């Protein structure tokens, strides 16, 4: 994900971002971790990395934990630590209940190393009801020396019963100064950092993606291009079909579209370079001249709503159709004016 391939130098700054993170990290350093934590915050704020930092703090063999360089820290960061189990959905699918049961079964047995076992599940909302119930049981009757780190991008989607059994850790946007320092430590040029910082909104994931030229592939770029050039029902249907067919990649496509609209919003408010819209279709650049902030916000809200509906298992086809109709409506207003 980042340039040097080592994440720790940058993320060590985490505990300077907010006091809540500092307190939690301190619990892990002292070996006094609770049995379950729920890490919340938007995608890209560093939940997964912070979870790894916490695990490192638990296993680190140095005085100053987590050092990031000892064998234990390296194993955790490289996903080679057998006592750290990580559960992610395959593709964009759900996390099957069997996977959850398997992991809980594994951690119920003896640990391989120091005695601690850590389970990282991301995102918890990708577990179906059966999976969440299986997890709930282990949260109600905590296993000794097992720490659950549950990550969620959408707090509201998390079962309240699970949340109530976890210590909640809220990831907050990085202050610009800290993000700048972290990116400089990673070896990025100051001019590049200055260019992308106002677009990143304190989100390290966004910053890294933007600074590396955006990790958007051709398919993503072409999708954004098409979604910002809607001019008829037929074009909306075509873009909607692309999003439907890309189901497993739809998060990436929606993120890229959201970034483009957000960038336009920043451009309108004069917060970014005058050339910031040059990468977008000409029709969108013309719209950009006239469109109101309210209209851009309506478009952003439509994207948030689509994400929310998908988490709620609402029919994906009708969700993306609605989204594109909304985007078409907004664009039409400014194309005609
Ligand atoms: Zn270490």
Image (tube, rainbow, N blue to C red):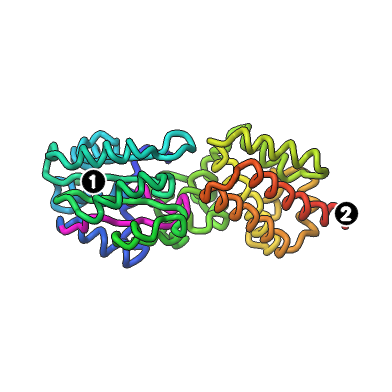
Give the magenta range: 32-50
Instruction: Name the image quarter holding the N terminus.
Output: top left
Q: Residue at x 31, y 60 (%)?
A: 15
Disc 2 target residue: 336
**Is ligand 1 less than 8 Å from the beta carbon at label 1?**
no
Q: Which numbered dot is residue 161? A: none
Between residues 66 and 257, which one lies in front from this camera angle?
A: 257
What is the residue that sits farthest to the right in this orientation? 336
**Is ligand 1 less than 8 Å from the beta carbon at label 2?**
no
Residue 331 belongs to the span the image colors magenta: no
Whether residue 236 is visible here, answered yes or no, is: yes
Between residues 282 and 84, which one lies in front from this camera angle?
A: 84
Q: Residue at x 47, y 48 (%)?
A: 205
Residue 35 belongs to the span the image colors magenta: yes
Q: Secondary structure at mark 1?
A: strand
* Callout count: 2
Image position of 63 (left or right of 208): left
Instruction: Name the image quarter holding the C terminus.
Output: bottom right
Taking the image in four quarters, ligand 1 sits in the one at top left
Disc 1 target residue: 118
Q: Position of residue 53 (x, y in %)?
A: 28, 49
Instruction: Please identify the quarter of the rendering in which residue 32 is found.
Output: bottom left
Image position of 252 (left or right of 42): right
Q: Position of residue 154 (x, y in %)?
A: 47, 55
Instruction: Please identify the quarter of the rendering in which residue 316 is found.
Output: top right
Q: Residues within 10 Å of mark 2 (few under 14, many from 20)?
A: few
């Amino acid at each position: 994900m980042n340039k040097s391939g080592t994440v720790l130098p940058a993320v060590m700054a985490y505990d300077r971002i907010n006091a809540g993170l500092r307190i939690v990290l301190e619990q892990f350093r002292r070996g006094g971790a609770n049995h379950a934590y729920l890490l919340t915050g938007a995608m890209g704020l560093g939940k997964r990395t912070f979870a790894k930092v916490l695990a490192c703090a638990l296993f680190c063999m140095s005085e100053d934990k987590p050092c990031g360089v000892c064998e234990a820290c390296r194993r955790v960061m490289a996903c080679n630590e057998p006592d750290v189990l990580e559960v992610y959905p395959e593709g964009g699918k759900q996390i099957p209940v069997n996977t959850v049961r398997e992991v809980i079964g594994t951690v119920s047995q003896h640990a391989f190393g120091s005695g601690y076992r850590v389970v990282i599940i991301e995102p918890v909302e990708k577990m179906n009801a059966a999976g969440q119930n299986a997890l709930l049981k282990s949260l109600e009757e905590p296993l000794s020396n097992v720490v659950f780190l549950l990550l969620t991008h959408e707090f509201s989607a998390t079962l309240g019963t699970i949340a109530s059994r976890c210590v909640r850790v809220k990831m907050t946007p990085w202050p610009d100064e800290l993000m700048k320092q972290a990116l400089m430590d990673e070896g990025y040029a100051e001019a590049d950092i200055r260019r992308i910082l106002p677009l990143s909104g304190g989100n390290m994931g966004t910053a890294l993606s933007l600074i590396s030229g955006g990790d958007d592939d051709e398919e993503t770029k072409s999708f954004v291009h098409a979604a910002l050039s809607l001019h008829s029902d037929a074009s909306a249907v075509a873009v909607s079909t692309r999003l439907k067919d890309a189901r497993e990649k739809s998060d990436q496509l929606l993120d890229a579209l959201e970034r483009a609209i957000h960038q336009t919003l920043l451009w309108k408010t004069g917060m970014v370079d005058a050339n910031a819209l040059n990468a977008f279709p000409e029709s969108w650049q013309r719209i950009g001249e006239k469109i109101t902030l309210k209209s851009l916000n309506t478009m952003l809200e439509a994207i948030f709503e689509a994400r929310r509906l998908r988490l709620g298992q609402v029919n994906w086809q009708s969700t993306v159709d609605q989204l594109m109709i909304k985007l078409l409506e907004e664009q039409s207003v400014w194309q005609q004016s």
